[in-house]
Image: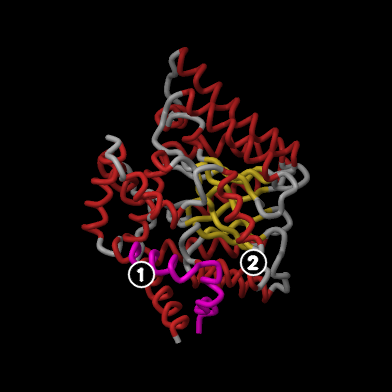
Amino acid sequence: MSPFNDTKIAFQDKSTTQLKKAYWMFKAIENPTLTNLGINVLNFTIKNDVPFVESIVKKTLFEQFAGGETRERSAQVVNQMFTHHIGSIFDYAIEGKEDEATFDQTCQEIKRNIEFAKGNPAVPFVVFKPTGFGRLELYSTIQAKGQLTSSETKEWERVVKRYEEVCALAFELDVVLMVDAEETQMQDAVDALVNRMMAQYNKKRAIIWNTVQMYRTGRLEYLENDLKLAQELDYYIGYKFVRGAYMEKERERAEALGLADPIQPTKQATDDNYNAAIGFVIAHLDRISGYFGTHNEKSTELIMDRMKSEGLENGHPNIYFGQLYGMSDNITYYLGENKYNASKYLPYGPVKDVVPYLTRRAQENTSVAGQTGRELGLIERELKRRRF
């Protein structure tokens, strides 16, 4: 029997009214056709400032999947979850903007998050997306070793400068900084930049962390090569492991360009790859720290079992677990209850700017097999438990 079935633990921070609202929201996004239609309508209405839509979004999707409109307003959620031994990872969830002013603003926001996290055990990590610091097309050109114009060269120098500024501040304040993953057409450029930062700042412990998407092919070989490099240059590695977020887009791009499919052929192959990464980290805890971002109960149980068989304490400082805020509370709250290093990715930002993130969450719940049904089943069970 799964250890993640105790709904009393899972929903202890939710009122019955909140659970009922969540139930109807998940019910609404259960149908892929209706979800995609709704997302198209939502994006149109938000873009065109249709009255009342923003307030409706704020009371539904935003309330379910985001901490608040600002870091400070999210603090109530942070403090409440930490009473259950659950940390928060602030995610400044502004997406889809590509102007230099926004990149500079995002960089400043990440710096403020680092300052907020200093000495704060409720905020164990700070995170940023590479496309929050520069254009995807620019990273892609760098990765392809394309010829840059003089203006693009200066633009890339500004991207590197943003990385250097946030990494230096994280090192100075002893705050772990995690760099999210992106699409394959730019990920190699990100990896090279993050590895430079690791070699510079991770001499005593893993301060700068990268993200590895295990639905990609060749990731185990990538981990082996990274480990050899870290051993040669004598620095520590931190990774966040996820399955991945761009499968349809990656496959469409590969087919259009006549490239090899960069994604594992089956869901089982992805699961096997992810689970192999668990073994890789646990075999190299002297050099590697791992953050396992997963909503998969079997993978979570595997990590717990491996820790137990290796005689590792639940709160081992090199092993972390994470789920997205608003999803899989049955996993997160169980882990927190048993004093594992549990955490939630906690997005925040102005409602209008966070809509692209929210719609991705809705689509993810629709596309991931069994995800929405599991959420609904758990909520139903807890509502029934409270009635009786």
173 sits left or right of 13 in the view = right
Nearest to N terminus: mark 2 or mark 1: 2
- Neighbor class of circle 2 (other Cα within 10 Å; few <14, some 14-19, many 20+) is many
Q: How far apart are the alpha carbons under marks 2 and 1? A: 27 Å
| Residue receiving disc 1 | 370
Task: Tell me the mark number nearer the camera, choosing from 2 and 1.
Answer: 2
Inspect the image, locate mark 2, and give the three-letter code of the amino acid beneath it: His
Would you place residue 88 above or below residue 142 in this image? below
Left or right relative to 361: residue 284: right
Residue at 37 percent of width and 71 percent of height: 376
Q: Residue at x 61, y 60 (%)?
A: 80
Determine whether 328 is above or below 250 in the image: below
* Residue of label 2: 84
Q: Residue 224 colored magenta?
A: no
Tell me the SS state at disc 1: loop
- Name the outermost residue toward the top: 150
Residue 297 as seen in the image, left or right of residue 368 = right
Where is residue 97, by image quadrant? top left
Q: Could you tell me how many numbered marks the image carries?
A: 2
x and y percentages locating residue 25 in the rendered image: 34, 62
State the image coordinates of residue 19 (x, y, percent, origin top left). 43, 68
Q: What segment is highlighted magenta in the picture?
A: 1-26
Quarter of the image with the C terminus is bottom left
Badge 1 local density, few (<14 within 10 Å), some, or many (20+)?
Answer: few
Q: Position of residue 300 (x, y in %)?
A: 54, 69
